[in-house]
Amino acid sequence: MKITILDGYCLNPGDLSWDGLRRFGDVEVFDRTAADEVAQRAAGAFAVFTNKTPLPAAVLNQLPDLKYIGVLATGYNVVDVEAAKHQGIVVANVPTYGTASVAQFVFALLLELCHNVKLHSDAVRAGEWSRSADWSFSKTPLTELGGKTMGIVGFGRIGRAVGRIADAMGMRVIAHDTVQQNAPLYTGFRWVELEELLRESDVVSLHSPLFPETRGMINARTIELMKPSAVLINTSRGPLIVDQDLADALNAGRIAGAGLDVLSVEPPDAGNPLLSARNCLVTPHIAWATREARGRLMDLVVENLSAFLAGKPLNVVS
């Protein structure tokens, strides 16, 4: 059985092993695959694995031997699922591997906005502390999170993990979700509508799926509801935010800052307004990418294929 991995470097830059898949057949691993190379490299494969390499209908039509597509991620929009279903190809993703890592990254972004740790470290290395007339100094205002309100938009696995951390740090947690059940026992927790959440929160953290109704949910109108002192964190899906509207708000001081691990187009072009916006951190979609999370992802990829071959497929999206 031929197994082709189209863009293996993203999941495994060399610190993990593909041996779990090799027990099922002959595995060919490509670090990266251009769009015009996919059909050739996947020719004759029974199973193909992809992270971000697109598998549109035009390519799938050239792969009559293909029976299984494993997505090396949670999001599966790179695969034409309807075309795969029409051809009898099962598509499976991995939905739960990165919860702890993404929740942790929310606070990496947030704490950097609160303390500007790198800026102050660089200042010390440049001699500014040694030259300071004061015992200590700060280059920016410093913010304490205890007692402030964390508003979480989308209260699924990751949103709840963020809520637990926020509660442990002494923050009040409020949440908005279309499904409001199993409320946590945090002191002061409330379900709220989105507009109320935006008005009350000192920190807004987005964890909503991308649906037509959530696309552009953070825009000029909704940003106007937020406190001028509030910060926005997005580790979910970039198109939840209208880039230009957020950049305009940051540059005008209508909100205090933003930490973004995702953008509407990835990677961004040089003209993306958020790359030059005031007090805006942008990281390259890495919240999911700790070694621990990638290890879990690799294990689940193997488990998904094993279950499919046993006639009991898991995590099927097609």
Image (cartoon, rainbow, N blue to C red):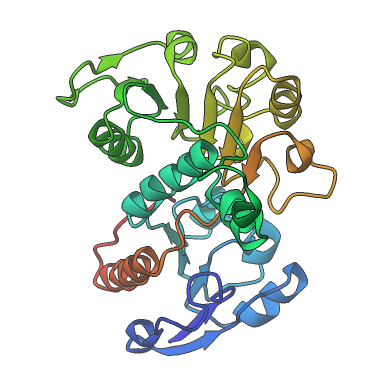
> Residue 163, position in %: x, y?
30, 33
Name the foreground residue: 225 vs 59: 225
In which quadrant of the rendered view does residue 248 lie?
top right
How many marks the image carries: the answer is 0
Vertical side of 222 occupied by 120: above or below: below
Give the residue at the far left of this rendering.
185
> Residue 232, position in %: x, y?
54, 29
Q: Quadrant of the N terminus?
A: bottom left
Vertical side of 135 occupied by 5: above or below: below
Q: Is residue 130 rendered to the left or right of residue 294? A: right
- The residue shown at (53%, 87%) is 28
Give the residue at the far front of this rendering.
133
Q: Is residue 235 visible?
A: no
- The residue shown at (64%, 60%) is 54
In which quadrant of the rendered view does residue 26 lie?
bottom left
Name the foreground residue: 16 vs 131: 131
- The residue shown at (33%, 38%) is 162
- The residue shown at (44%, 51%) is 318
Vertical side of 178 occupied by 193: above or below: above
Give the residue at the far right of this rendering.
271
Q: Is residue 93 visible?
A: yes
> Residue 34, position in %: x, y?
73, 71
Name the foreground residue: 17 vs 130: 130
> Residue 160, position in %: x, y?
28, 35
